[in-house]
Amino acid sequence: MSTSKRVRRILSRLILSILFRKKKAVKIGIYGPPNAGKTTLANRIIHTFVDENEDVGVSTEIPHETRHVIRRAGILIDLKRHGRSNPKVSRAKLMLDVVDTPGLATKIDFRDFMAYGLPEDEAKRRAKEATEGVIEAIKWLDDIDGVILLMDSTEDPYTQTNVVIIGNMEARGIPIIIAANKIDLPDAAPQRIKNAFPQHRVVPVSALKGENMEVLYAEMAKVFR
Amino acid sequence: MGIEMNLVSRDKIESMGSMEKLRFILDDVKSGNIVVLEGGLTAEEQMKLIELTMLEVDDNFPGIEISGYPAKRSLLSLRKKTRLTVIGPAAKMRTIKKDEDLISAIISTT
């Protein structure tokens, strides 16, 4: 084959691959402190767009229930198809991988787990796994395309962990949405989160009850595209 | 017995490399001391400090308490300037209130 033919063939392959390339799914990490409802949110997204009976993990009242990163690939957020059409983003579709991460903490004490009735051996094992989970969650930040930072609306949002996550995302230029979770609880105060982080979009939701989720999905389709 | 508090100048912190800085802080905190950094740590350094801390958590050292004023961008600079950061052993220090320019913490001597 002559050189010019070879060059033409390479060029045509290149043009075809650019024209018909499949858009890669974006990896969205759900980050936040322990017990903010990260796994509940991941489950809610999957129940809505994939399968009502599929769960990525189990949620309990014991902190650090999720101790390893779990990735659920290939979730198509299709707002129109799921009747969650918003006039501004009605055609928006987003293919994403949801990455449910262990809660970020600066302190993990096995005695805290014993307060939930776990025997000492079990509490120590859980604490050890929880520390590994925090490290794993931090390492995953290198592979994430966008972050949903989940905060508990009933707690003080201005914690150093939240500030550190936001600071890291800003330094890396990774898009971030803050979801103010647990708005179904009587002492929820999502406005406090808005006041603490005025430079970011804050979406109040209840991942457990499914309240206001369509606004979060619309925001995800807009920000993570 | 009281608690030792080490107030570290911006010059001293800036003279150290990134890992040297984190090792210096964590060793001091593991000894039971409170470390106050005049110049503070960047968000990336704080994340690395959390990671390093998690590697060293055991039955006697449950981790750290960290609090700091958020970094601020000055009018003429593109980089955010870090401000004061306080780090202490989680078993002894607990932040009770924190906002842009105020940190209130309780230090337990028992």
Image: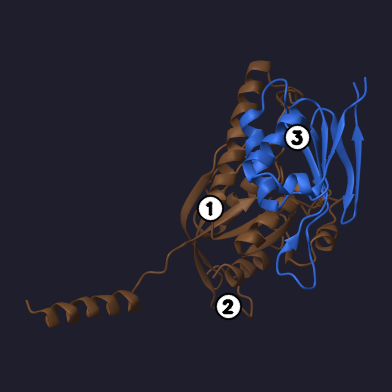
Chain colours: A brown, B blue
Query: Which residue type carries mark 2?
Result: Ser
Q: Residue at x 55, y 54 (%)?
A: A47
User: Image check: A41 left or right of A3?
Assistant: right
Residue at mark 1: A142
Residue B62 placement (x, y as % from top left): 73, 28
Residue B1 vs A224, above or below: the answer is above
Query: Which residue type carries mark 1?
Result: Asp
Q: Regarding mark 3 in the picture, which secondary structure is present there?
A: strand
Residue A208 placement (x, y as % from top left): 69, 50
CA distance for labels 2 and 3:
46 Å
User: Image check: A104 left or right of A194?
Assistant: left
Contact between marks 1 and 3 (CB within 8 A): the answer is no
Residue B25 placement (x, y as % from top left): 73, 36
Furthest-left residue in view? Answer: A1
Crowd class of label 3 (few under 14; some 14 to 19; many from 20; radius 10 Å)? many
Q: Is residue A219 visible?
A: yes
Q: Residue at x 87, y 57 (%)?
A: B100
Residue A27 vs B33, above or below: the answer is below
- The foreground one among A210 and A114 is A114
Q: Nearer the viewer, mark 2 or mark 3?
A: 3
CA distance for labels 2 and 1:
31 Å
Contact between marks 2 and 3 (CB within 8 A): the answer is no
Q: Regarding mark 2 in the picture, which secondary structure is present there?
A: loop
CA distance for labels 1 and 3:
24 Å
Q: Are marks 2 and 1 on the same chain?
A: yes
Residue at mark 2: A90
Q: Regarding mark 1 in the picture, which secondary structure is present there?
A: helix
